[in-house]
Image (cartoon, helix red, strand yellow):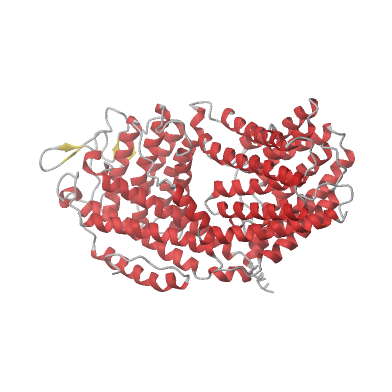
Amino acid sequence: MSRSRRVLPKLPPWLAHALRAQRGPVPWSAVTRGALSAGPLLLVAVQVGRTSLGVVAAIAAMLAGINDRPGSRRASVKRIGVPALGGALGMVAGTYAGQQTGAVVLTVILTFIGLVAGSISAIGPVASAVGTQLLVASAIGAGMPLPEPGWERALAYVAGAGWLLVLRLVLPTPGSLAGDFRFDGERKAVAAVYDAVAELLDAVGGPEAIRRRAALTAALDHAQDALAGPRLRRYASSSAERRLHAQYAAALPLAEAATALAWAGEAVAERASEGPRRLAAAVRGNSHTGPLPAPSRSAPALRALDDALLHAAEVFDQGRGGDLHTRPRTTGDRLRAAFGSAGREYGLRVALCFGASSAAAQALHQGQWYGQHEHWYWLPATAVFLVKPDLGPLASRVLNRAAGTVLGAVLFAGFAAVLPRPEGLIALVALSGALIPVATRHFAAQTAVVTVLVLALVMVGGEPQASMGRIGETLLACAIVLIVGHLPMPGQRGGGVRARLAAASEAAYAYLTHVLDEADTPRIGTVGTPSERRGTSGTPCERPGTPSERPGTSSEHRATADTPSGHRATASERRVTPSDHRATRWTLRREAYRTLAEARTAISLSAHELPALARHTEGADEVADLLERLVDTTTACAVHLDDTGRIGPEHTERLTALLEQLTGPVERVGLRPPRTSLAG
């Protein structure tokens, strides 16, 4: 008797997103920092008789722990420190507004703060974290009954976040003591780029190639951010850091060649990925590369890969520094993002939800619904974590927030019944701080941990156990945000997605225009004619040592290739020296792929909203697909151009077809495609 296969119904996108969790190894370093942050701060404050300031410092350390993500120490200064300054400003503003004004004026002030915080959140991830802490701290400052003035609360807030930042900068990560542990985050990020290149080469010609190319973009973005953190000096000051910059720059031509091979869709030999893997191991171990296998030189992209490997071997030995090929955002760019359509929509949505929840909280508080519990600020603070669209779809976050709060409140009620006070509660705060880096993988888990931590802080501060009140306020905040978040708003909805798509479109066309202009520019700095550069055979060129491997030591890997003129040109002279046009091209390519990845993220979040909101960005994914194919084709054109001095007819045909296909979808989402020499 045959068994019929049960077909499970497909979940709606908003529900599927709510059930999705990130995976990965446990970040033990972040867990250690979390355990040493909020709990010890609170313990010291209790011992010296300043419990209320200890509660503020612990809250700041908790929020800083949510921002303590993988990356370099230098990048963590901006990722943790800048939002903490925004939180301190919110603490001051909220404290004095709560002390000097009545309920109506306070609600208006908090609504205005919501408008400002929402608008600046459209600038980027760090600005969004600033907006989040500004809102949360302003609500806490206005509502938490503390004896200290606003400036003392702000100092305690900065001290709490600063303590976690000090731990991030000082404590080494596991396995980093072998080298200069200051740059372990940068080293890991750069090594991941070479690993991503190898994985893309393995996937060429298969169904995983598109996903691997996206993973390469993510690795490059992460490495770029890790290396480009804030610094006192304009350039890298240590040899170790300059070496990492050079190793990152050497990965760009490898990534370009691998992308061109993926575009061609013809599988390559397994040995092609061995070179990038050895380079990744060399970065990770801070060592020499050793022999690098030479791939076949039977196609332009393979020749580009071969030359890029030799160039990387030279760079790894010399380590003289390199350009990160970034396009820094100006103040004008940030202002346009904050006051543009995306910033206006974001700010209005946050202001309405934050203001409505503040008004409801004030009405309930003034009506004595809270009884003796002075924590009306929980309602607007909860709304902050629900309403911000860059943090996740609204419906998904509402479901997870409600479930996580109920779980956390029930768990805390059990702990509060058996733990001694305050010692047991302080230990619970330390445990919760340690769990935050793991819990951030799913919003419900993060909410449960944060709920336990906050309720413990409230009890340490002298208030009674308030689990049931916390559940009621969270459910009320969820209802307010769901209703207000779906109200009709002035202007066209989906402004955030359209702004990201417009930036991606502009970057893609700038990259394409540069490559087309390169085709019309005389080739400078390349030895020999195109036919001489290609060689007379498709077999790998022999290197000193063995026929199929190039040595990686300083005395050997500067191997040369004979040209018909008798000049023995190094790899850098032959091909990969970052001349002005090529360095600009790499910068434009990085910008195109980075903005596309940001647009993809915004589109994905919008697609997982409830249908009433998701319909405003329909068709955006089609535009992103076409732009991605356009950038991939432009990269293949650039590699072919370097090899032959011209753009081939196949590339021209593909580019023209893509530009024609883009016209309709781009106009349907409310954008206007720029013109090029191919599109007219």
Question: Can the viewer see residue 294 in this picture?
Answer: yes
For the residue pair 282 and 620, the one nearer the viewer reads as: 620
Camera-nearest residue between 314 and 609: 609
Residue 144 vs 386, above or below: the answer is above
Residue 275 seen by the camera: no
Question: Percent from the top left, x then y, of residue 436?
Answer: 68, 42
Q: Is residue 467 left or right of residue 346?
A: right
- Asked whether, in this view, residue 10 is left or right of residue 428, the answer is left
Please state which of residues 99 and 55 is positioned toward the viewer in this rendering: 99
**Extreme residue in the left direction:** 565
Q: Residue at x 55, y 30 (%)?
A: 175
Residue drawn at point x = 30 percent, y = 39 percent: 311
Which quarter of the rendered picture does the C terminus lie within?
bottom left
For the N terminus, the quadrant is bottom right
Residue 265 on image: x %, y %: 36, 60
Choose between 359 and 630: the one closer to the eye: 359
Q: Which residue is drawn at the image coordinates 50% and 59% (left, top)?
A: 340
**Quarter of the rendering containing residue 172:** top right
Q: How many marks?
A: 0
Q: In which quadrant of the rendered view does residue 395 lie? A: bottom right
Left/right of residue 665 with respect to residue 391 in the rendered view: left
Q: Position of residue 281 (x, y in %)?
A: 44, 36
Which residue sits at x=44%, y=62%? 502
Residue 421: x, y in percent?
Answer: 86, 34
